[in-house]
Amino acid sequence: MDPYLLRKLNAERAARRAVIHLTDLGDGRDRVIREGDPVAGPLGEAIARAFRSGRSGLVEVEDRKFFLNVHLPPARIVAIGAVHISQALARMAGVAGFDITIIDPRTAFATEERFAGLDLAADWPEDVLKARPLDAYTALVAVTHDPKIDDFPLSQALTTGCFYVGALGSRKTHAKRVERLTALGHGAAEIARISAPIGLDIGAASPAEIAVAILADIVAHLRRRPLLGAGP
Amino acid sequence: METNDVFDPLAIAERWMDDGRMVALATVIETWGSAPRPVGSHLVIDGEGNFHGSVSGGCVEGAVIGEAMEVIADGEPRLLEFGVADETAWRVGLSCGGRIRVYVERVG
């Protein structure tokens, strides 16, 4: 592997851009291809397919064998609410390999002391998400219970096609939330994508157990998402 | 989709390279049956035999590291195959019954 390409590959991955590392297994030569880079012929078609499916694999073109290693942006979690559940979720997410950002405008909750060493933003989601928008490779977890804080990011998550959208609250709370999101122009099918009550039903009782249920739900959505197009 | 923590093999490969260490990269390029790690998984190895990542559930890493030492020495990439049908399976086979092919190359 070309050392320059290793650097380029890592830089692209760090910037959350989809890339393919292409190796000619005959002579060992390699390339890094960004999504949208023009590649002609059958190899170009195979590359386009690999970007869509996210699947790495071998391709044979004109008696030459290539290996395509597809690198889609890593799944990350954005948690709205610097609450007890998020404290546990943040640590578990790191172990499971997810980047996580916690957003909460309530400065009493969003303290460095409670979230030491984590990516914490003590601002309104409206402001934070402007600079770092949600995308299809992001899971949105809304756990403040407060519509003033949760509703905007939930609406954004549905619009941008986050692979997971979860909202904390009882069925009654969620029914009211559905009304508000409908008023914002979201259709029933879109709103039905929200996991509410949030997390897999494992009878979780404590905040840490609820965090386990949420993380398991996120993994389930990530690994069972439909292939092609929007899915990371 | 991948994970990006401190154990990311490609990030480690770059750090090791910057430290002036010799580095080989092993990649799962094909799998059959119940292979433990998916296509695209990496194992990064340095000239001393230090390694991070995985190409299986720990069953064949030892053999891959041995080959990586030779790849680092001569710079020639190698294509390795492991599986129950392979006679090396008795020594370093995949207990899960799968088969994998692993491409090992030197960085630089």
Image (cartoon, coloured by chain):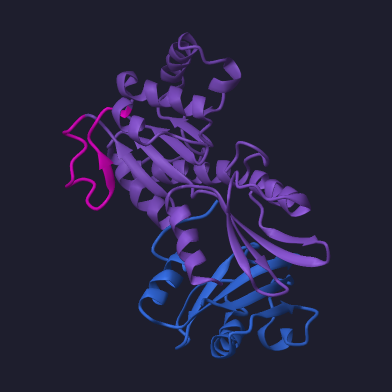
Chain colours: A purple, B blue
Look at the image and say whether residue A122 sits in the magenta stretch: yes
In this view, the residue in front, A14 or B6, is A14
- Residue at 57%, 15% (x, y): give it: A187
- Give the quadrant of residue B50: bottom left
* B14 sits left or right of B92 in the view: left
- Res. B104 image quadrant: bottom right
Front-most of residues A132 and A21: A21
Specify the quadrant that holds the N terminus of chain A: bottom right
Where A34 sits versus A104, above or below?
Answer: below
Residue A222 can be seen in this image? yes
Question: What is the chief secondary structure element of the magenta stretch?
Answer: loop
Q: Position of residue A45 (x, y in %)?
A: 74, 48
Residue B95's x, y, as percent? Answer: 68, 76
Is A203 situated above or below B32? above
- The residue that appears at 34% across and 52% down in the rendered structure is A91
In the image, what residue occupies the spot 57% across and 41% down?
A221
Tell me where the magenta segment starts and ends, as one range. Answer: A106-125
